[in-house]
Amino acid sequence: MLSDYGIDHVLLERHGSTSELPKAHYLNPRTMEIFRQFGIADAVYAQGIPLEHMSKVEWRTTLTGAGPFDGRQLFEMECFGAGGSTAEYRRNSVCPPTNLPQLRLEPVLRAAAQSRNAGAVKFGHELVNLTHDDQGVNASVRELDSGEIHSVHAEYVVGADGGKTLGQLLGIEMVGPSKIFETITAHICADLSPWWNEGVIISHFLPSGGRLVPMGPTWGPSSQEWTAHFAVLPGEPVPDDVAIVSKIGELIGADVDIAVKKISHWWAESVIAERYQDGRIFLVGDSAHRLPPTTGLGLNTGIQDVHNLAWKLATVIRGDAPPRLLDSYTSERQPVGLRNVEWAMFAAQNHLAIDAGFGLIPFPLPPGVDELIVSGFFADGLVGEARRARFRTVVATQCIEFCAQELEMGFAYASGALIPDGATPSTGDPLGQVYRPTTRPGHRLPHAWLEHAGKRSSTHDLVGAGDAIALITGRRGGAWVAAAVEVAEKLAVNIATAQIGTTHRDVDGQWEAVREIAEDGVVLVRPDNHVAWRSSSHDDQPGLVLAAAVEEVLAR
């Protein structure tokens, strides 16, 4: 992003190469919109899972097996914009979600960074120490191959190190519970194609409690790689690698060759940095927040942190805004980070409700109890039917993890580099399902298809990959367009304009449905495609009003 904004920078990475572990894998529509804005979405989609292979999550006893209750599907749920919600997802975003594990995503990002900033993407370099003052930041960096220490001076530093170094050096406390529960992740190769259901992206297993996820590189039942996940309950012994492979075999229920690539142990956390900024140093991603993987918010929140910060850094470094513009990074992103940390924990806890809905108790059970629970679940008669009905009711609430479109798209900033207009915010959907597009300041600009000069584009394309501010008005908004030309010259800012109904055509009426302004109103959009300011109708002095709005948004 900084390269596209024309800002000199160096990227330092402690590891010698990109991740060898799958790690995070779900990329939500908002993140894919950001990738599209900077020209890398196509490369991600080229390797990512097609939507038809990530349309369902399921709960099963095992994949297969000879036992009377083996291979049974307990519940199936549409997810990530599939089935009945497909049209809604397509209407609300130009970008569908996808799934691409970090070990394949990171090389795409690395190639994009190196093509834009050759020679300044340095792997195998470790931050040792740093000092900062009003003049800049001085960092000591160790080149791991040679052991040599180099000094680097920069105007600003962005810490995306997962909280391993920078936050500790600065004494920034992570607030919230850590080491909530231990999870074991096994990255394996196996042929599960005879039993894996088409369209399924995650299989949860009860009563074992494990989970299987395809990792590609071929998608669908023919996936060559998988991850198996197991939570270690309090009081349970941590299994060794042999026992873990045996547990994976139990999930599958058949004698299958399992080649283990890597087994890792990690602790779920629900923590957020007490502050995102310390002078000229900023924290993003896992340096600022670490959360359970439920709802797939970790990586996505980090990408969105950077999207928020990059245009502000570029604007300040070029001298187009004072440094106080950067204060809005914390005021905007920390509340979103906290909400996502809390939601991920909420969704993780709901799996305990699902276990209870199946009849499980959250502590180790005596031998044979699992079999009684399963046989009772499938029993004929009134009680068996009641158990199954209860389970269906409870597990359906996990839509908070797999269908959370409002959570992914509807996050908004209450204060910061924006001008609130006093409009009453929507109460939203308490379960995070229903996204309501709005042009209220602080919200993501709604997507709508436009046609201009014979080409079709999204409202999101108006800002481009540069640092343009976009001004959108209607048929009677010519005065705003003229004012934008004057203000751009006067304030030395780049303002792209769209007069929908005149220069641009609202292709399918979507903009009219979501604009919330009159034909002579105006919406001002930031480079990160969040609404900065709007006026519901015309103003007698559009130039003065627009100039004042731009200056306030840029903290001038």
Image (cartoon, grey):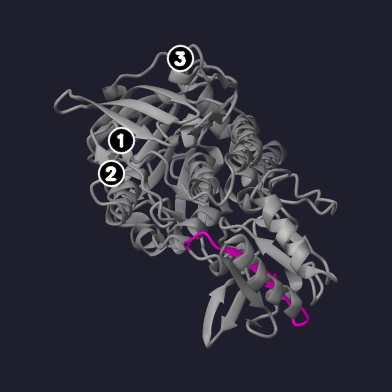
**Label at residue 121:** 2
Toward which corner of the image does residue 340 lie, by quadrant?
A: top right
Bounds of the magenta segment: 465-477
Q: Residue at x 26, y 31 (%)?
A: 125
Q: Residue at x 65, y 41 (%)?
A: 332
Residue 532: x percent and y percent?
A: 69, 55
Identify which residue, 545 or 356, lies in the foreground. 545
Mark 3–mark 1 distance (CA, rounded to whole Å): 36 Å
Q: Amino acid at mark 3?
A: Glu
Residue 26: x percent and y percent?
A: 46, 48
Q: Is label 3 or label 1 in front?
A: 1
Badge 2 marks a residue whose secondary structure is strand
Toward which corner of the image does residue 24 lie, by quadrant?
A: top left
Badge 3 marks a residue whose secondary structure is loop
Secondary structure mostly seen in the magenta stretch: loop
Q: Which residue is mark 3?
A: 236
Identify which residue, 384 or 546, lies in the foreground. 546
Q: Within the magenta stretch, is there residue 424?
A: no
Mark 2 or mark 3: name the one nearer the start of the chain. 2
Q: Residue at x 32, y 51 (%)?
A: 113
Q: Within the magenta stretch, is there residue 467?
A: yes
Is residue 188 in sight in this rendering?
A: yes
Residue 150: x percent and y percent?
A: 24, 27
**Label at residue 421:** none
Do labels 3 and 1 touch, CB within 8 Å?
Answer: no
Residue 3: x percent and y percent?
A: 38, 53
Q: Amino acid at mark 2?
A: Val
Do labels 2 and 1 touch, CB within 8 Å?
Answer: yes
**Label at residue 13:** 1
Q: Is residue 415 left or right of residue 363?
A: right
